Every structure is written in structure tokens, then in C-alpha cells.
Image: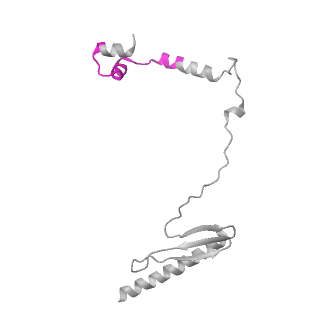
Amino acid sequence: MDIKTLSTILGHVSSKTTLDIYLHSTEEMKKEAAEKINARFNKDTDGNEETITEEQEKPPQAKFEPKKGKMRKPGTGCISKINDHLYEGRYSPKDAYGKRMARNIYAPTREECEEKLAILIKEMKAEIAEQKAKLKNA
């Protein structure tokens, strides 16, 4: 009989309860299922036995290319491409008084923009440190 009818006769709330209690698998059942699956994968669409070559066993190695995320780490500024020959670097930390201060630099290549941005960040951090020292002494 179907599982739903059996579940109702036994007084179970759901057929899942009946399956959990009465359904079991033996080692022989598992072995038969594994053999059926194995036989299915070793046959082609015509039902003929297929030999598996070494090339089929090893999937091709994918070429790894690291993905650059869109977000940079905090405190490193940001760089955006304005057009084919101009990049903009921007750094906008908070000063000693909590006010946001922003500065931009421009360069023809991304690499040059990265270099200029690194220099700008060092200068701005030194400027903020001076402000904090003055604020502390005042």
C-alpha cells in the first residue's frame, strides 16, 4: 500500500513519521544501489560498456586569475578611471576635529596614480597627526 494510507492507518500525523520509524536500509540494499549507479555511469547512451580513459578521469586544470574586489581596504583611498588616459585617486579621512577632509590626485596611468595616492596618504596622515598634537597641547 502507499505510505500515506499506511500512515493514516497507524495514526501518525505525517507520512514522514512512518518513514522514519519503519523504513530502513541494509548493507545489501546499499551495495545493490551502488552497483546500479556504477553500471549507469559506465554505459553510453546506446547501453554499451564505455571505457574510461585517463583523460576523462582528470578534469582539466582551470587557469587561476585572482579577482580584484571593488572595495579597497579602509585607509587606502580609492582610484577610479575617468577616461582612457586619466585616473583619479581620492583620499578622504577625518581630521583631528572629526570633520571629513578630501583630496584628489590625477595621473595618466593606474600605477602612477597608486604611487601619487600613497604619497598623498602619508602627507595627510602627518597633517592629521600635527592637528591632534596641537589639539592635545591646547
- The quadrant of the image that shows the C terminus is bottom left
**Left or right: where 1 falls relative to 60:** left
Residue 15 position, x and y percent, is 35, 20
- Spot the residue most to the top: 1
- Spot the residue most to the bottom: 138
Which residue: 49% across, 67% down? Answer: 74
**Left or right: where 98 falls relative to 54:** left
Magenta region includes residue 29 = yes
Residue 10 position, x and y percent, is 29, 14
Which residue: 63% across, 24% down? Answer: 41
- The quadrant of the image that shows the N terminus is top left
Q: Kindly indicate the quadrant of the structure image that contains residue 69.
A: bottom right
Instruction: Report the label total.
Output: 0
The magenta segment is: 9-32
Q: Kindly indicate the quadrant of the structure image that contains residue 26.
A: top left
The relative height of residue 82 versus residue 70 in the rendered view (above or below) is below
